[in-house]
Image (spheres, coloured by chain):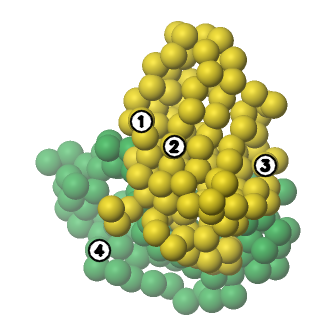
Chain colours: A yellow, B green
Amino acid sequence: GAGVSQSPRYKVAKRGQDVALRCDPISGHVSLFWYQQALGQGPEFLTYFQNEAQLDKSGLPSDRFFAERPEGSVSTLKIQRTQQEDSAVYLCASSLHMDSRQPQHFGDGTRLSIL
Amino acid sequence: AQKVTQAQTEISVVEKEDVTLDCVYETRDTTYYLFWYKQPPSGELVFLIRRNSFDEQNEISGRYSWNFQKSTSSFNFTITASQVVDSAVYFCALSGTGRRALTFGSGTRLQVQP
């Protein structure tokens, strides 16, 4: 497809379970970002990749959060031992270059609900 | 540290009214970039515009216009003759040479009534 694709669209998990969220960026885009958006709030940065290299993970809230992009295209965000405060929409974005001036293009997000 | 403030939580207007969404930012970067995104109920963030810190020329695109004032650290967004399809949450965001990721404001929910 032409845009950023995220799956699943919705995910419900019980507290303590592990979850994996997938992001397929726009073809050829070098930079990939993950954001977390709580209800009624703006997105907050989690982590950033340039190709397969994770250059910034300063926004990951705990060591239960882990992201990878092994071949420089598809990325997976994994959350281990989920807790209720992890409930949010997880947004993935990609941009063509690493330049800060490049607009980021977002997917529809994965809405995660932890019961 | 970077910060973006959108003081207006929610605005409601009647169709064809003009509306301005405010955005104030803080950054230590000398070169930075400001963005506006639209988030309709479907959830996807749609890129609207980017502004460079060294270019204060205002911009108009159809019914949309943006007023960038470096002296007041503001980047306001005006919709002229609003339409029901403009109903969405609008986010102002900032990136810079010191921080590649976007820093978002908390958003302004715009409701345009028919």
Find disc 4 in the rendering and name its residue.
B63
Say what amino acid the circle numbered 4 marks: Arg
Q: Report if the CB atoms under discs 2 and 4 are less than 8 Å apart.
A: no
Q: Can you name the residue that lies furthest to the front here?
A: A71
The reply, left or right, for residue A18 in relation to residue B86 is right
CA–CA distance in space, label 3 to label 1:
23 Å
Q: Mark 1 — on which chain does it sit?
A: A
Q: Name the residue tied to disc 3.
A: A57
Q: Circle 1: is it few (<14), some (14-19), or many (20+) Cα within 10 Å?
A: some
Please give the chain letter of the residue carrying mark 3: A
Report how far apart the C-alphas of labels 4 and 1 lie in the structure. 35 Å
Q: Could you classify mark 3 by the number of other residues whose Cα lies within 10 Å: few (under 14), some (14-19), or many (20 or more)?
A: some
Going by the numbered disc 2, the residue's amino acid type is: Arg
Q: Is residue B4 visible?
A: no
Instruction: Tell me the CA gap for discs 3 and 4.
Output: 39 Å
- Element type at mark 2: strand
Residue in the foreground of this view, choosing between B15 and B41: B41
Instruction: Look at the numbered disc 4 and give the secondary structure of its residue.
Output: loop
Q: Residue at coordinates 25% horizontally, 61% vertically from top-left?
A: B82
The residue that disc 1 covers is A8
Which one is nearer the viewer's eye here, B100 or A32?
A: A32
Question: Which one is in front in this view, the residue at disc 3 or the one at disc 1?
Answer: 1
Indicate which disc, 2 or 3, sits on the residue closer to the N terminus: 2
Residue B96 image position (x, y, % from top left): 74, 71
Q: Nearer the viewer, mark 2 or mark 3?
A: 2
Q: In the current view of this chain or complex, which residue is farthest to the left?
A: B114
> Where residue A57 sits in the image (x, y, percent)?
78, 49
The residues tagged by marks 1 and 2 sit, at their Cα atoms, a distance apart of 7 Å
